[in-house]
């Protein structure tokens, strides 16, 4: 019988028995102790078009006193929120994201000091647009209603987890292909699966910034593009002696 070179990865010999031994036969456990196994990573991804978006927008007002700035801001925000509801946005899809009252300071060089020169009030809401085709229309609407602040837009694939199932299948197929190739190159045969671990890749894509000048335009062209949904898995396999 042809001798088999161990393909164990350093550092994992102590971990794999804990992960997989509970479901192994005594023969498989013996193979595991001898280090006759291989671990590989597999990758899979799918493209998906976003079908909704979160937009952060609002109003910044300045006035000589905090009360004047707040009163003006409240009136402007009420107009925007009422207009969004009239445009078909559900109340549950409008959420206050930020509210600030801050003094404005003026520098006096001759005095070497600062003095309060007025107040600013910022109120921003996050609006969920569930029909992506209406996004440009909604952005136009909030500008017309008086919004002068827009910080971000975040495109969303609502059924991303379901779409990832295809990426998961591709990742497993990729891992099995790699493991089989390595086993054959080492003169072995790929055995049963010992462990499968899915790894979360990175963080959600950060919201895309929006600048004030684009919000002031006559129309807001929107390019939705597509999102890449990726999955990475790690799999370990028993190795059998090639006959």
Image: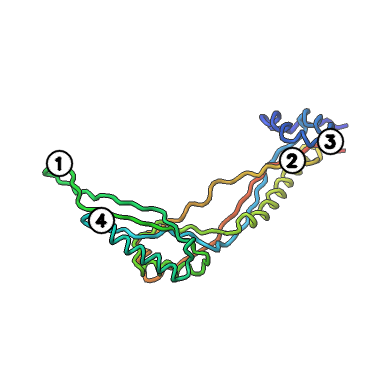
Report, in whole angstroms, how far the alpha carbon at label 4 lies from the one at label 1.
28 Å
Task: Give the spatial CA distance, label 3 vs label 2.
Answer: 13 Å
Q: Which numbered disc flags the more N-terminal residue, 4 or 1?
A: 4
**Quarter of the figure with residue 146:** bottom left
Q: What residue is rendered at 35% in x and 62% in y?
A: 77
In the rendered view, tell whether residue 237 sits above or below residue 47: above
Q: Which residue is mark 1?
A: 112
Badge 1 marks a residue whose secondary structure is loop
Disc 3 versus disc 1: nearer the observer? 1
| Nearer the camera: disc 3 or disc 4 | 4
Q: Are marks 3 and 4 in contact (CB under 8 Å)?
A: no
C-alpha gap between disc 1 and disc 2: 73 Å
Are there few (<14), some (14-19), or many (20+) residues within 10 Å of tag 2?
A: some
Mark 2 vs mark 4, CA separation in Å: 72 Å
Give residue 51's quadrant in the image.
bottom right
The residue positioned 41% from the left and 56% from the top of the image is 96
Figure quadrant of the C terminus: top right
Residue 198 pos. (x, y %)? 66, 44
Label 4 sits on a secondary structure element that is: helix
Mark 2 highlights which residue? 182
Q: Earlier in the sequence, mark 3 or mark 4?
A: 4
Q: Secondary structure at mark 3?
A: strand
* CB within 8 Å, label 4 to label 1: no
Question: Looking at the image, is mark 4 or mark 1 nearer the viewer?
Answer: 4
Residue with the mark numbered 4: 67
Instruction: Indicate which disc, 3 or 1, sits on the residue closer to the N terminus.
Output: 1
Between residues 68 and 113, which one lies in front from this camera angle? 68
The residue nearer to you, when weighing 219 against 239, is 219
Tell me which colouring the rendered structure shows. Answer: rainbow
In the rendered image, residue 7, in percent from the top left (x then y), is placed at 74, 33
Identify the residue shown where x is 26% and y is 57%.
Answer: 69
Q: Disc 3 to disc 4, how far (Cα)? A: 82 Å
């Amino acid at each position: 019988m042809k001798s088999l070179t161990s393909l164990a990865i350093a550092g994992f010999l102590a971990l794999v028995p804990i992960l997989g031994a509970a479901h192994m036969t005594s023969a498989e456990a013996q193979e595991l102790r001898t280090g006759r196994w291989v671990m590989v990573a597999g990758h899979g991804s799918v493209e998906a078009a976003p079908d909704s978006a979160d937009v952060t927008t609002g109003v910044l007002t300045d006035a000589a006193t905090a009360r004047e700035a707040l009163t003006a801001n409240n009136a402007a925000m009420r107009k925007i929120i009422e207009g969004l509801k009239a445009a078909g946005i559900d109340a549950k899809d409008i959420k206050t994201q930020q509210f600030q009252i801050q003094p404005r300071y003026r520098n006096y060089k001759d005095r070497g000091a600062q003095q309060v020169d007025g107040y600013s009030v910022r109120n921003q809401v996050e609006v969920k647009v569930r029909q992506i085709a209406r996004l440009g229309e909604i952005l136009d609407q909030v500008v017309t209603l008086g919004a002068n602040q827009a910080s971000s837009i975040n495109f969303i694939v609502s059924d991303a987890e379901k779409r990832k199932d295809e990426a998961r299948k591709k990742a497993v197929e990729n891992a099995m292909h790699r493991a089989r190739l390595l086993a054959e190159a080492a003169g072995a045969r790929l055995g049963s699966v010992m462990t499968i671990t899915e790894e979360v890749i990175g963080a959600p894509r950060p919201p895309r910034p929006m600048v004030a000048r684009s919000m002031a335009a006559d129309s807001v062209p929107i390019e939705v593009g597509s999102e890449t949904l990726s999955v990475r898995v790690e799999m370990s396999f028993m190795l059998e002696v090639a006959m």
